[in-house]
Amino acid sequence: MRIAHNAVVLVADGRKLLFLRNEGDVDQPQLKVEHAEEQDNPADRDQTTDAAGRASSPQGHAQSSVGKADAHQIEEDRFAANAADLLKRRALAHDYESLIVVAPPRTLGELRKHYHKEVSDRIIGELDKDLTGHPISDIEKALIAA
């Protein structure tokens, strides 16, 4: 994948995000960190205490279990929605013209649900990998190879 000079690269998962900007050129990208965020999101078992509930029919005859919401996943989805909102605010402020998004498949899907048209119009590439814990040089190599 070719990364234009001054393009923004968002590298995210459900609890971390990095905004990188290419200060190099398409042949030799040099990604520099502009912004980083990390959210503390403990495992579901550490966030909830109740077991799944039970529901009765209106007549009171049948009972069924009610699925328990995964608090950890809900927070990861909320984090992705907030990242999409940040992308929107930056796009509307004309902070970037081209965008590449790197995220694991589930996070990428959640981001897509929340993209504003101005963000969608600026996306020049996506990579469905989790690279949030990798050094910038590895991110550059993965993007060049994509």
Image (spheres, rainbow, N blue to C red):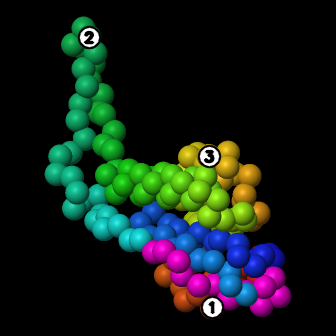
Alpha carbon of mark 2 to alpha carbon of mark 3: how far? 42 Å
Element carrying mark 1: helix
Looking at the image, the residue that sits furthest to the left is 49
Residue 145 in sight: no
| Residue drawn where x is 56% and y is 46% of the image | 114
At label 2, the amino acid type is Pro
Residue 79 drawn above or below residue 8: above
Say few, some or many: other residues with alpha carbon within 10 Å of mark 3 (under 14 / 14 to 19 / 20 or more). some
Say few, some or many: other residues with alpha carbon within 10 Å of mark 1 (under 14 / 14 to 19 / 20 or more). few
Alpha carbon of mark 2 to alpha carbon of mark 1: how far? 60 Å
For the residue pair 9 and 93, the one nearer the viewer reads as 93
Quadrant of the frame with the C terminus: bottom right
Q: Which residue is mark 1?
A: 137
The quadrant in which residue 97 appears is bottom right
State the mark number for residue 51: none
Q: Which residue is mark 3?
A: 116
